[in-house]
Amino acid sequence: MKVILSMLLPTLSLARFSEVWDRQTEIEHGIVERGSYELGSAPHEYMDSSDLPDNYNWGDIDGVNYLTKSLNQHIPQYCGSCWAHGSVSALGDRIKIARKAKGVDINLSVQHILNCGGVGSCYGGSVIGPYQWIHSISKSTGSGISYDTQNSYLACSSDSKEGLCGHGDWSCSDMNVARTCSTFTSMGGKCVGLSSYPNATVAEYGEISGADAMQKEIYKRGPIACGIDAAPIEDYTGGIATDEGSSVDHVISVVGWGTDADTNTKYWIVRNSWGEYWGEQGYIRVAFGALHIEDSCAWATVDSFTAPEMNNQVPCYEDGSNCQ
């Protein structure tokens, strides 16, 4: 086992901007509610702390992996959309948990949130905002967040001019919710928006803070999205990060926790959205109480999702003409 320390290379880097909105900015964007669930029904409200195990990792429950793939928010160009990635990854995990890790993984569309959510952009967003937005459209339209197979991540928002972003339309149109393209334009082809598309909805959502509440929520229902101080971990290459940190400026998903066998130090198992080239294959272990990871977290429960076993797909033609 590695010695407990933050294994960070001593390099100079550009000043990091915060990708997490403060409370005032959230209010200005309509993020007022801090949750929508029946009080007393959340694990942190009823579960006994003595029931928590010393180690719990949704990536290895009796040899079964319930986690979806790692993501990279920074390609095809830089985009500060960690707030969307952290929440989408955790919700995708919870769908996989609901499916008992059977079938092909369902991966949700981060780009859909960037195009339509109004709770953030490539210049930052809200920890709880994505869940509030998905919950809202779930209740108002009956449809939720699109799958990434019909709305791939392009690392763009309407306010970004990075790379290809300044040359595209990132408004919340049908085309920017779910789309397909029939063939080459030289052969008469075109791209169309789909009115029926695979999607996932949210039943309830809320926020928590503190190690005990986080463990109970993760243990009972699955990974959660949390804020973290990313400045000390930009050059992380392995080990357990112990830096105290200064403030929350980034969002990740927490998928479990462990206990170091040699020192009895407890740590969070964290999936970042910087690609698998970073850290421990895209993950980092963070000591309990470090990097402000326990300050602000959000969770959501799955309501419905499109899947073969649910027999709820609306089959569309290749060109999407019957689903417009």
Image (cartoon, rainbow, N blue to C red):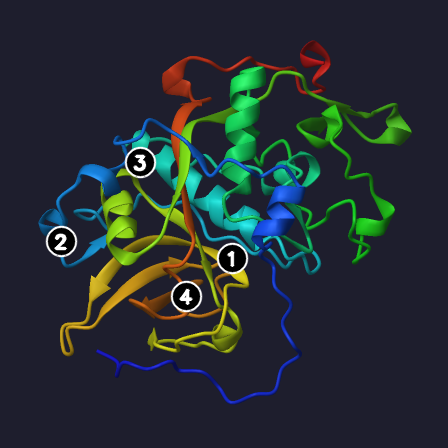
Residue highlighted by disc 2: 53
Q: Residue at x 56, y 48 (%)?
A: 126
Mark nearer the viewer, 1 or 4: 4
Disc 1 vs disc 4: Cβ atoms closer than 8 Å? no
Q: Residues within 10 Å of mark 1 (few under 14, many from 20)?
A: many
Residue highlighted by disc 4: 292
- Say which amino acid is labelled 2: Pro
Determine the CA span between mark 4 and mark 2: 23 Å
Residue highlighted by disc 1: 273
Residue highlighted by disc 3: 97
**Secondary element at image label 1:** loop
Determine the CA span between mark 3 and mark 1: 20 Å
Determine the CA span between mark 2 and mark 3: 19 Å
Q: Is residue 306 above or below residue 244?
A: above
Q: Residue at x 52, y 19 (%)?
A: 139
Determine the CA span between mark 3 and mark 4: 27 Å
Q: Is residue 275 above or below residue 323?
A: below
Q: Residues within 10 Å of mark 2 (few under 14, many from 20)?
A: few
Mark nearer the viewer, 2 or 1: 2
